[in-house]
Image: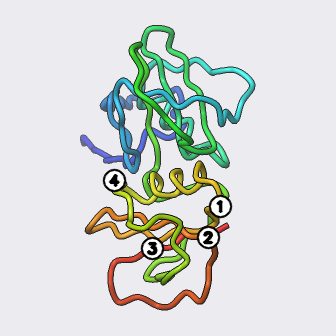
Amino acid sequence: MRRCWPKTSIGTGSNSTGDKISGYHPDKCGGFERKDAWDIRGNDILTSPIQQPDYASCCSQCQATLGCIAFTYSSASQQCSLKTSIGSGRSSTGDRISGYNPNRCNGFEGKDAWDIPGNDILTSPVQQPDYASCCSQCQVTSGCIAFTYSPSSQRCSLKTSMGSGVNSTGDRISGYN
């Protein structure tokens, strides 16, 4: 009898002593956003990169490592650098590929359906593609200790304080440290 067990990730993988054959897409990783030609400098979990055969294996290593929410992978050197945050990533001319969890941000507590009215640092919200990017914007903005993000409009409002946050009926997610 032939059996197939679909998987959501490649996990840590292991050698099989039986008649099992595993397959995976080396350029994809569930739950992580992929950014080609993008490098995340600093925020390293380990003192030096680890060797991984492909992007998906690097991502799987990140998923299995406590505190890892992003990584940068080089296909030429097969080096995988695990990260605690996406920080201020930037374009790369090399073969760097970065992956990050768009729903997590190290050092900030997230609260769904919560809005922080007022206390804005900027006169208008900035556009960010996801919660993690909004959080990173807050981390690199002087005086920012909280933010409110709207997934539908991709609007990120940076805040000087939590103030008196309130429940939201809209699609607001707030982060604070």
Q: Which residue is mark 2?
A: 160
Q: Residue at x 32, y 66 (%)?
A: 151
Amino acid carrying mark 1 in the image: Gly
**Mark 2–mark 4 CB contact (< 8 Å):** no
**Neighbour tally class for label 1: few under 14, some 14-19, many 20 plus, Cα within 10 Å:** few
Q: Does label 2 or label 4 sit earlier along the sequence?
A: 4
**Side (left or right) of 142 relative to 100:** right
Q: Which residue is mark 4?
A: 129
Q: x, y (%) of residue 125?
A: 38, 65
For residue 173, which numbered disc appears in the image?
3
**Mark 3–mark 4 CB contact (< 8 Å):** no
Question: For the C terminus, which image quadrant?
Answer: bottom right
**Neighbour tally class for label 4: few under 14, some 14-19, many 20 plus, Cα within 10 Å:** some
Q: Does label 3 or label 1 sit earlier along the sequence?
A: 1
Q: Does label 1 or label 4 sit earlier along the sequence?
A: 4
**Neighbour tally class for label 2: few under 14, some 14-19, many 20 plus, Cα within 10 Å:** some
Query: Does residue 59 lie above or below 32 as drawn?
Result: above
Q: In 3D space, how far apart are the residues under numbered discs 2 and 4 (Cα atoms)?
A: 22 Å
